[in-house]
Amino acid sequence: MKKIISILLLCGLFAGTLAAQNTRRTSVPLQHGAHRLGPRTDAYMQKWREHGLGQFIHWGVYAIPGGHWNGETYRGAAEWIRSWNKMPKADYDQLYKQFNPKNFNAKQWARQAKEMGAKYMIITTKHHDGFCLWPSKYTDYTIANTPYKKDIIKELVEAYNAEGIDVTLYFSIIDWNHKGYRSAAPKTEADKAAYEEFKQFTRNQLMELLTNYPTVNGLWFDGSWDRAWIEQAPWVDELEGELRAFRPGLIIGSRFRADDHGKRHYDSNGDLIGDYDQTWERNMPETLKELNGVDWDCVMTIPENQWGYHSDWSLTYVKQPYELIEMLVKAVSLNGNLVLNFGPDGNGNIRPEEAHIAKEIGTWMQVNSEAVYGCKNSPWEKQGWGYYTQKGDNRLYLTVFNQPLNNKVRVKVPKCADDKKIVIVEKAWFLADKKAAVVKNGGRDKYGNVYYDIDSPVFKTGSPYVIVLEVREVDKDKKDEYQQAIM
Ligand code: H76
């Protein structure tokens, strides 16, 4: 038995993720843990996996104060201003009466997202304050009762879908506006009854959203960390089943429900709950190993920690387009999607800083998106110049972020499982101008690994560029036939 296990582990190069997941299972009996081991294989999830880049939008009545109240500045995340002692909650709860975004143009937002290269968009239907951007019939605290009146979610879903962009709905479990909402687990009978009402309300709103917007194929849950919610795990599991039955292919991350023992994201056996790991908020994994084979997205702010509109970005570090492009390529190189957040203002304008970033990313994507869409992790050993992404078995993209001082991009060739075979570079070119790249035999490093050096002048100062390699596994003794192009 032991021998079999160690053979299995040795062959683990490709089966690595499965083996790791299986060996991690400690078989705690669970009724509400992961309902599936390993990634989904259906077409919806396959499409999601190929998106690479998404757009997040945080929009609500918090965009009106934009991080300020009564001449004072709130330094926390603007969408949380209601929780600030200096802002009276009663004042906040009246803001919707002024919500009238006269410059809002869903088509313009969608066009901008498309030009940036986003393949899916996540919109806050309701954030923690409970304000609904759609005319929910289960509460009065909605867009229908603002001067604007029109259904913003409908406008956005239609406009984005028309640009070929999938829409996922963000939904906060926390709802500061609902009288039955509780954060702590309800103890008294009265609290329990109130919370039951809140549960029904939550269920009704979710079914309403899926009914109203039939093209929506994803739900992005947030604010699900309350003890009250965690304790409802069996009920939430049932609700998840109802939502999935209602909308075939629906994609729900790990942030919706807990397991039987209150464990979130990963159940008591270490298995992922839901379709993808939703723990990467303003944070990214460093290696494939720590991901254990799961799908994931990274939701990222442009400032440090502002999701909703905050008028004063001078209080925070603001990421550069270059950094965001690096995060995007890095995410794809680790089999994830990067979802970049935008916080439009109270009039429906996308702020100039965000528009600028969208444009810069879009300009880069226009030339280089081939290295992003439909790409995944490459087993080639990461080098200091940047990231490998890969399409199929034979095509590698090298996105160079750190230009080597000698203008040579070094690639180390992985060893083949079959030692009569060798990996060769058949073709190499620069993605930007399609010009062939010169690949030189570098020799062997001190561990005996073969490497090549690719002559690589900088294309455009400050802009990451892509080298494409077509590689192939060939018999060692036929290597020369294939490698005429290599000096
Ligand atoms: C905390 C928190 C919330 N989760 C992020 C995705 C934002 O919505 C933020 O307000």
Image: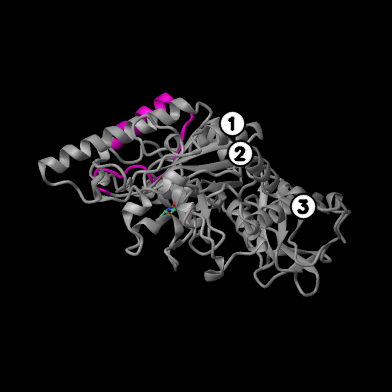
Q: Position of residue 467 (x, y in %)?
A: 77, 56
Work out whether mark 2 precedes mark 1 in sequence or the reverse, and give the earlier one: 2
Q: Is residue 406 left or right of residue 218?
A: right
Q: Amino acid at mark 3?
A: Val
Looking at this view, is 109 or 87 the one in front?
87
Quadrant containing the C terminus in the rendered view: bottom right
Say if the magenta span includes residue 313. no
Q: Residues within 10 Å of mark 2 (few under 14, many from 20)?
A: some
The amino acid type of the residue labelled 2 equals Ala
- Magenta highlight range: 236-262
Q: Nearer the viewer, residue 219 or 410?
A: 219
Residue 468: image tag: 3
Secondary structure of residue under mark 2? helix
**What residue is shown at x 53% (from left), y 47% (from top)?**
57
Q: Name the disc covering residue 37, or none.
A: none
In this rendering, the answer to whether 149 lies above or below 321 is above
> Viewed as shown, does residue 29 lie left or right of 159?
left
Label 1 sits on a secondary structure element that is: helix
Q: Tell me the tag on residue 106.
A: 2
Q: CA distance from mark 2 to mark 3?
A: 37 Å
Residue 158: give its label: 1
| 3D distance between C-alphas at marks 2 and 1 | 8 Å
Which residue in the rendered view is the most extreme toward the bottom? 405
* Dot 2 and dot 1 residues touching (CB under 8 Å): yes
Q: Mark 2 against mark 1, which lies toward the viewer?
A: 2
Task: Name the N-terminal-most of marks 3 and 1.
Answer: 1
**Horizontal and vertical percent position of residue 321:** 66, 60
Residue at the extreme left of the image, as rendered: 189
Identify which residue, 392 or 330, lies in the foreground.
330
Residue 73 higher or lower than 388, as above or below:
below
User: In the rendered image of this protein, does residue 473 appear above or below residue 313?
Assistant: above
Name the residue at 56% across, 33% down: 155
